[in-house]
Amino acid sequence: MIALKNDTFLRALMREPTEYTPIWIMRQAGRYLPEYKATRARAGSFLGLAKSPDYCTEVTLQPLDRFPLDAAILFSDILTVPDAMGLGLYFAEGEGPKFERPIRTEADVKKLPLADMGSLQYVTDAVRQIRGALDRRVPLIGFSGSPFTLACYMIEGGGSDDFARVKTMMFQRPDLLHAILEKNTESVIAYLNAQIDAGAEAVQLFDTWGGALSHHAYQEFSLQYAKRVMAGLKRENEGRVVPRIFFTKGGGLWLESMAESGADALGLDWTIHIGEAKKRVGDKVALQGNLDPLTLFAPVDVIAREAERVLSDFAYDQNATGHVFNLGHGISQFTDPAHVEALVHAVHRARTGM
Amino acid sequence: MIALKNDTFLRALMREPTEYTPIWIMRQAGRYLPEYKATRARAGSFLGLAKSPDYCTEVTLQPLDRFPLDAAILFSDILTVPDAMGLGLYFAEGEGPKFERPIRTEADVKKLPLADMGSLQYVTDAVRQIRGALDRRVPLIGFSGSPFTLACYMIEGGGSDDFARVKTMMFQRPDLLHAILEKNTESVIAYLNAQIDAGAEAVQLFDTWGGALSHHAYQEFSLQYAKRVMAGLKRENEGRVVPRIFFTKGGGLWLESMAESGADALGLDWTIHIGEAKKRVGDKVALQGNLDPLTLFAPVDVIAREAERVLSDFAYDQNATGHVFNLGHGISQFTDPAHVEALVHAVHRARTGM
């Protein structure tokens, strides 16, 4: 094991002592950065960028060259797995992701294959290349959509306001939804383990849409499969534990059961008081979050004050453990990069006076 | 006071004993009913319908003529108040509501008047006419958008995914947002009291967008003003208490503070286990909810089973008090009316064997 220059993030995820609260930002490599837009323009299309290890390496490192972030996250799309299950991912101009062949019928479900890991080599190649380029500055996070969140896109064929197709299947043919979730679970385990083998030093499971479910349906259709993903992941690589983060947007009501998922840390959106979350999960998991992304539209002094409030809600002190600072969801493309810099410095400064 | 033929709903809101769990359905008068669509076609436009006491009376009674619901709710739009503040409500074909003159600048805020109650006479006329037509069958619910939810539409100029304009104002010029909320609060109090004077026997404050806020921002920008609305409402009319329901979609994390709002009942969306909600609020308030609206896309036997699960989660028995059954949000326009009938009967049957 070659030591990381900065392993603060990994230690915080494992609830070990850290000198300051580490920070990374969901979607930190993205459209709010002019250098990202320049790379994206050279790549010609979003998928042209996302499927090229060279471009992925370039944009993954861009935010780290600007800000002293404590982790890098693989640049990729959340829907690579269903694409590798043959659904035909594409991006219509000015719209979100879509699938050419959504999964709607029993016949669709029956013929749905597991993700073809060979066709996902561009992702593991990117992980290896990014690790090389990072040269152990900070850890690299791998990620996947959760089985349920992937199923939402696979069934709806794209984004949705109300998940009417997913929920119709859930209520009319729960067996079909479970069959899709089984295949997604197996595919996600293989995908994340391949990222770990290629060098991902932590992994995050993004359950973007689990919060659309009822209490009971969340347990049955999202959490159950997230647990199985956690149980299927390699625990160590390169002589070090690979921590797992589980993030259900809108999952604040279900933290106690999420804390039993096998994750080392739970991501929180901004609707929950992080101190109350800490009381509820006790010492079972670390917490990651949870500033409202639109706080970055505030003047820089307000950003610093709001960041300090999250830190003090967590009740940090010199010995605090188990908090990774982040936004409660992805950063807005309309964010001023100077405001991100102010946030990173405010978080680092809070406990060290740096 | 002339006795209502069915006051089960009002008694449940006040946590008095009832023979069965009463039910009404958010948006029960609406597009899922063919007779509503026929009236809407005759009215020529949505606002033509919503601003006509005759049409409002007709559509308010339509669901009651089909199903043995335990309450009627005034048919109206959530944005009548900002319209009466001069913002120019309109509906673009195939889109949601919009305002011709959104509130964006300090000058806009300064010249924003309180709602002109004279221009809202069509609403109070509708309340009186509906009360006459109901002939005391069931109670009539009046309603308003919450000060914060109205501000969202007023500032965004329509719907929004992320409330970027509202939150930008909140972080950059909180004084302006507070000034709007003050005017909205005063207008909503006058509006709901006028509905009570005209005969509304219960009122609901809809905080559709409060759930988009952080824990702290919810307290400061939504709940604080909802409390002031509650404090400003007439407590009795026609010799009877007028119960108040407060519904923040996505507010499940904040129930303890919502229970201190002065509301008699809290509306719940479907993400929370209603039994856990009951434990958290104790005997402070009744609860209304909380079936996922898309459950109505299920076969009728599944609808009955899911409804019974909500009832048993609430731990009802012959002496249970304080539960009004409802969906967790408005009914989908694509719902089969026969499925609504199955739901109403399942809820009524559960405790009485009717």
Image: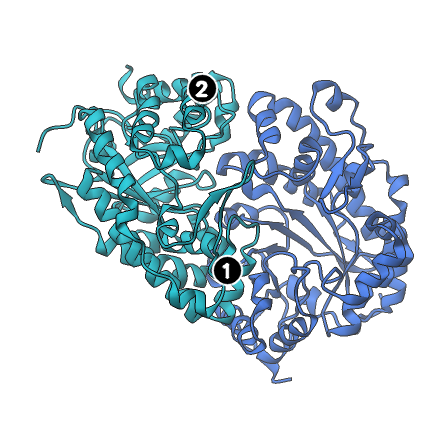
Chain colours: A cyan, B blue
- Image depth: mark 2 or mark 1 in front: 2
User: Is residue B131 positioned above or below A81 on the image?
Assistant: below
For the N terminus of chain B, the quadrant is bottom right
User: Is residue B348 positioned above or below B165 on the image?
Assistant: below
| Amino acid of disc 2 | Pro
Q: Could you give the CA–CA distance between mark 2 and mark 1, rounded to whole angstroms?
A: 37 Å
Judged left or right of residue B49, residue A282 is: left
Judged left or right of residue A102, residue A274 is: left
Q: Label for residue B218?
A: none
x, y percent for residue B26: 68, 59
- Which residue matches tag 1? A166
Residue at point 56%, 47% (across, down): B258
x, y percent for residue A177: 43, 65
Report in which chain the residue with disc 1 lies: A
Q: Residue A320 versus residue A204: which sits nearer the camera? A: A204
Marks 2 and 1 on same chain: yes
- Which residue matches tag 2? A34
- The local crowd at label 2, few if under 14, some if 14 to 19, many if 20 or more residues have their Cα within 10 Å, is few
x, y percent for residue B24: 68, 65
Which quadrant of the figure has residue B182?
A: top right
User: Is residue B152 positioned above or below A230 on the image?
Assistant: above
Residue at point 35%, 48% (across, down): A280
Report in which chain the residue with disc 2 lies: A
Marks 2 & 1, CB-CB < 8 Å contact: no
Describe the element under mark 1 as helix, strand or loop: helix
Q: Earlier in the sequence, mark 2 or mark 1?
A: 2
Residue A242 in sight in this render: no
x, y percent for residue A193: 22, 48
For the C terminus of chain B, the quadrant is bottom right
